[in-house]
Amino acid sequence: MPAESITGTEPGEMFVHRNIANMIVHSDMNMLSVLSYAVEVLKVKHVIVCGHYGCGGVMAAMKNQQFGLIDNWLRHIKDVYRFHHKELDAIEDETLRARRFVEVNVQEQVHDLGKTSIVQNAWKRNQPLHLHGWVYDIHDGLINDLGVNFTCPKDLHNVYHLD
């Protein structure tokens, strides 16, 4: 689904980066380059991590099946599952568990976004920058704002604050 369709914006109004399961991986130079350009050059005020229910990457990470090279990417998503395994394992219905996994994955990715030096340096410069976590439901077209909204380093645990 094109991001413009979800948000009701015109082509070119949004700067969009996509990857499997909307992961913020700190060694992903493509994601970091896009983020750097958006924050430092375009001076965007909002960065949205938007997942979607039924995400194939998230669902694949719930399995123990090998998929090939993508297994290396899925390992990052599996780490999110491990962090939240008590909550997720308690959900018996696999569909509901997958939906919740999509949500906690987005929440963790927003946290990871805030940990980047790009975002923290913007905040240090007092650049207005808001991080948001959303999940799009492809069945009803609604956006679920997860309420994960970061606007400054205080929104992160102290161990992640950069001087």
Image (cartoon, rainbow, N blue to C red):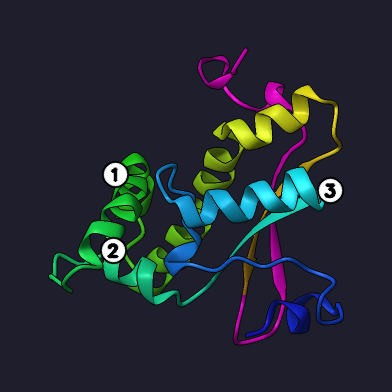
> Is residue 145 in the magenta section?
yes
Q: Which residue is mark 3?
A: 45
The numbered mark, 3 or 1, whose residue comes first in the sequence reads: 3
Does residue 18 appear in the picture of this structure?
yes
Query: What residue do we see at 56% from left, 35% from top?
Result: 116
Give the CA distance from mark 1 to mark 2: 11 Å
Mark 1 Cα-neighbour bin, 10 Å: few <14, some 14–19, many ≥20: few
Left or right: 132, with 126 as reference point: left
Q: Amino acid at mark 3?
A: Lys
Q: Which residue is mark 2?
A: 61
The numbered mark, 2 or 3, whose residue comes first in the sequence reads: 3
Query: What residue do we see at 73% from left, 66% from top?
Result: 15
Residue 21 lies in quadrant:
bottom left
* Relative height, residue 150 to residue 135 (above, below): above
Tell me where residue 154 appears, x and y as whole percent. 70, 21
Kindly report which numbered mark, 3 or 1, lies closer to the viewer in this rendering. 3
